[in-house]
């Protein structure tokens, strides 16, 4: 079974580093539309995948996904969902919700990695954060998302004697961390994200 996990923070303070150029309502709109695009891309694939959304904050209107509202820190919430809903050997894909360039083509590339039964990490464009992770359930006994998560995951994999292949994917590495990220998006993508 293939299971996607998409954590999302959906509060008035989400994406606060964009607050000089976007209102709280616009920031929530960007998050919701990015998430909807991601879910729609997964749903349009040939994968019979289960989608789990970990939500911190307000209600999000999504259908055909398993929604988990959690006040736990992200790494604990991921472990909780994994331990309570997944089976040994399930292929798990964790993707951040704020990937505005994610498309069906991106998912096609991800599908090829899922089928190889190896573990993969997708760093952000600065090689500091981790925007995606593909592994078999049971490979990780804990998660290390947060500051410097890219290097922290590589080090964690070494302690598990787990080969973790790094994949440079421009659509997964491009997340919305600051104003420059938003302003450098193509105009057609910006228009889809905000009214």
Image: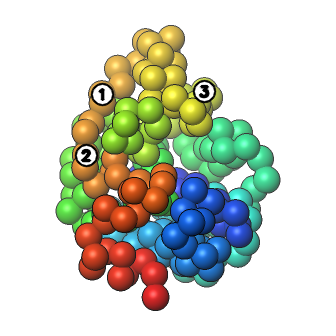
Instruction: Residue at 34%, 41% (x, y): give it.
Output: 125
Coordinates of residue 104 in the picture (x, y in percent): 25, 67
In the picture, measured across the screen, residue 66 lies left or right of residue 159, that is: right
Which one is closest to the eye, mark 3 or mark 1? 1
Q: Which residue is mark 1?
A: 165
Please tell me in which quadrant of the rendered image residue 13 appears.
Answer: bottom right
Q: Which residue is mark 2?
A: 169
Coordinates of residue 162 in the picture (x, y in percent): 41, 18
**Given contact means CB atoms under 8 Å apart, are the residues at marks 3 and 1 in contact?**
no
Coordinates of residue 97 in the picture (x, y in percent): 49, 60
| Alpha-carbon span between mark 3 and mark 1 | 18 Å
In the picture, measured across the screen, residue 117 lies left or right of residue 108, that is: right
Residue 176 vs residue 86, the one in the foreground:
176
Residue 51 vs residue 188, the one in the foreground:
188
Which one is closest to the eye, mark 2 or mark 3? 2
Q: Which residue is mark 3?
A: 141
Instruction: Residue at 31%, 62% (x, y): give it.
Output: 184
In the picture, measured across the screen, residue 74 lies left or right of residue 95, that is: right
| Colour convention | rainbow
């Amino acid at each position: 079974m293939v299971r996607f996990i998409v954590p999302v923070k959906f509060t008035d303070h989400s994406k606060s580093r964009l607050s000089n150029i976007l209102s709280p309502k616009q920031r929530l709109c960007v998050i919701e539309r990015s998430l909807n695009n991601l879910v729609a891309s997964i749903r349009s694939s040939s994968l019979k995948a289960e989608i789990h959304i970990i939500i911190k904050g307000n209600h999000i209107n999504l259908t055909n996904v398993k929604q988990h509202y959690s006040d736990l820190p992200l790494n604990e919430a991921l472990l909780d969902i994994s331990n309570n809903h997944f089976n040994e050997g399930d292929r798990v894909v964790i993707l951040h919700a704020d990937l505005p360039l994610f498309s069906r083509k991106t998912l096609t590339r991800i599908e090829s990695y899922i089928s190889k039964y190896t573990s993969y990490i997708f760093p952000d464009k600065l090689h500091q954060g981790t925007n995606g992770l593909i592994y078999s359930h049971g490979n990780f006994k804990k998660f290390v998302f947060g500051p410097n998560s890219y290097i922290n995951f590589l080090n964690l994999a070494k302690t598990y004697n787990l080969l973790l292949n790094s994949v440079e994917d421009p659509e997964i590495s491009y997340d919305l961390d600051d104003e420059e990220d938003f302003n450098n998006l193509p105009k057609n993508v910006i228009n889809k994200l905000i009214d």
